[in-house]
Image (tube, grey):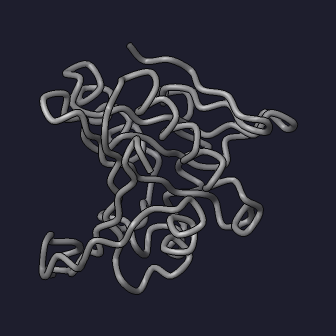
Amino acid sequence: MINDLFTKRLHLRKIQITDAPSLFKIWSDPEVTKFMNINNFKNEDQTHDMIRFLDKLSQDKLAIRYSIIELESNEIIGSCGYNSLDYENAKAEIGYDIAKVFWGKGYAPEAISALMDYAFNGLNFNRVEAKVEPENLNSIKVLEKLKFTFEGTLRQNERSKGIFIDLNMYSRLKTD
């Protein structure tokens, strides 16, 4: 069920323990993790633990996380995937992070487009959702570029870093 996904510039491959050194560099950057529900990592063991956690979710078919590999350099530049897979309701929630040095180069929309294509055409899902902190303007721009619809703000929807935070809900339907 877990397929590698390819775009013009990217290879999305299921996250592997051998990706830990590259992902640690990304997940240890406080600017990258500012709007993630994790604190920036302080050591690579945290990255190993996260990869094992994500692998368990994948084995249970609850989520899938991919490493985003730039084809030209073969470098891991981030991660993305389905934070949740709801087969009964034919929907998925996506998430993504990109190393700061690669921000603004169109990699996030390119990776998310591949996730949407697979959700709609590979998994035959009807809906793809993204929850974004209202202050995360870069991520909101990405979703707007991809024609996601803003549905509203979920007030104090999740606890992140010890406090309850609002999340904006965005979605894209197969028919959009």
> Extreme bottom residue here?
135
Which of the 4 quarters of the picture holds residue 157?
bottom left
Instruction: Locate residue 5 relative to residue 27 in the image: left or right.
Output: right
Residue 36 horizontal/vertical position (percent):
37, 65
> Extreme top residue here?
1
Residue 2 horizontal/vertical position (percent):
42, 18
> Extreme front residue here?
175
Residue 135 horizontal/vertical position (percent):
41, 86
Q: Residue at position x 56%, y 59% from top?
A: 146
Which quadrant holds the N terminus? top left
Instruction: Locate residue 83 relative to residue 157 in the image: left or right.
Output: right
Instruction: Locate residue 85 relative to residue 78 in the image: left or right.
Output: left
Q: Residue at position x 67%, y 41% from top?
A: 76
Q: Residue at position x 35%, y 47% from top?
A: 128
Q: How many marks?
A: 0
Vertical placement of residue 125 versus 1, above or below = below
Q: Residue at position x 24%, y 77% from top?
A: 152
Vertical placement of residue 145 versus 20, above or below = below
Residue closer to the observer: 122 or 70: 122
Residue 85 horizontal/vertical position (percent):
25, 35
Residue closer to the observer: 119 or 36: 119
Which of the 4 quarters of the picture holds residue 145?
bottom right
